[in-house]
């Protein structure tokens, strides 16, 4: 049996780093882990998706429709875009801060007025203002780490120390303390 996490966001938000941090803690715990990254237009503010599958034995990193245990959404519209991938009892963890994807910026789509409320009507949602918490730590860019902190609450098999160690090992040294603080803010949100 395997579990799966989708990480969705807009290019430049740190989805790739988040998937590597998750993969790192899972490998340390002894799981077989597969990662897949879909870059697309990530450098231009486009949609970015990464998959993390883990379990006793995993054969493919790809997450099919209705298979994701968690969707970690760095932006609510991106969470809505991939909602069909979530299991019926899965959990969408999303940032409430609005970051307009390229489809909104170019006028192809309108940003919904209450995207979080619409999501809550369709699935279980853990929402957090990651921007506010990241700013309290000293950097807007730590939003992804705040959301990882939220995710960690739902993965009790991974000890807090493992998460903090992964941040120390994978984040640039000058940003380690900031990201540890942001992670803890998310974990306690």
Image (cartoon, grey):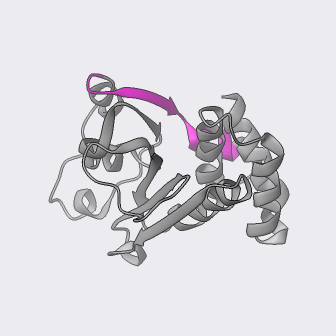
| In this picture, residue 31 sits left or right of residue 170 | left
Residue 69 visible to an observer of this rendering: yes
Q: Which residues are magenta?
A: 121-135
Confirm whether the magenta stretch covers residue 125: yes
Q: Residue furthest left?
A: 108
Confirm whether the magenta stretch covers residue 172: no
- From the top left corner, tell me how far across and down residue 71 is, in percent: 42, 44
Residue at 42% across, 77% down: 43
Residue at 67% across, 33% down: 156
- From the top left corner, tell me how far across and down residue 168 is, in percent: 82, 62
Relative vertical location of residue 120 with respect to residue 45 in this rendering, above or below: above
| In this picture, residue 23 sits left or right of residue 81 | right
| In this picture, residue 20 sits left or right of residue 45 | right
Front residue of 6/103: it is: 6
Residue 171 visible to an observer of this rendering: no
Residue at 32% across, 27% down: 123
Relative vertical location of residue 34 with respect to residue 69 in this rendering, above or below: below
Q: Quadrant of residue 118?
A: top left
Q: Quadrant of residue 103?
A: bottom left
- From the top left corner, tell me how far across and down residue 163 is, in percent: 75, 50
Relative vertical location of residue 33 with respect to residue 1 in this rendering, above or below: below
Relative vertical location of residue 74 with respect to residue 129 in this rendering, above or below: below
Q: How many marks?
A: 0
The quadrant of the picture occupied by the C terminus is top right
- From the top left corner, tell me how far across and down residue 132 is, in percent: 61, 39
Residue at 24% across, 43% down: 84
């Amino acid at each position: 049996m395997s579990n799966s996490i989708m990480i969705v966001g807009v290019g430049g938000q740190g989805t790739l780093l988040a998937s590597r941090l998750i993969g790192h803690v899972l490998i340390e715990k002894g799981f077989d882990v597969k990662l897949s990254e879909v870059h697309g237009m990530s450098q231009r503010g486009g949609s970015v998706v990464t998959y993390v599958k883990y379990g006793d034995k995993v054969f493919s990193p790809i997450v099919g429709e209705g298979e994701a245990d968690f969707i970690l959404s760095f932006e609510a519209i991106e969470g809505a875009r991939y909602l069909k991938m979530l299991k019926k009892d899965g959990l969408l963890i999303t940032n409430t801060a609005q970051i307009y994807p390229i489809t909104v910026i170019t006028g192809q789509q309108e940003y919904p007025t209450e995207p979080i409320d619409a999501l809550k009507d369709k699935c279980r949602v853990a929402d957090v203002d990651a921007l506010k918490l990241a700013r309290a730590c000293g950097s807007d860019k730590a939003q992804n780490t705040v959301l990882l902190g939220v995710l960690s609450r739902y993965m009790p098999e991974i000890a807090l120390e493992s998460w903090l160690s992964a941040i120390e090992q994978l984040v640039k040294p000058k940003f380690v303390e900031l990201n540890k603080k942001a992670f803890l803010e998310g974990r306690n949100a």
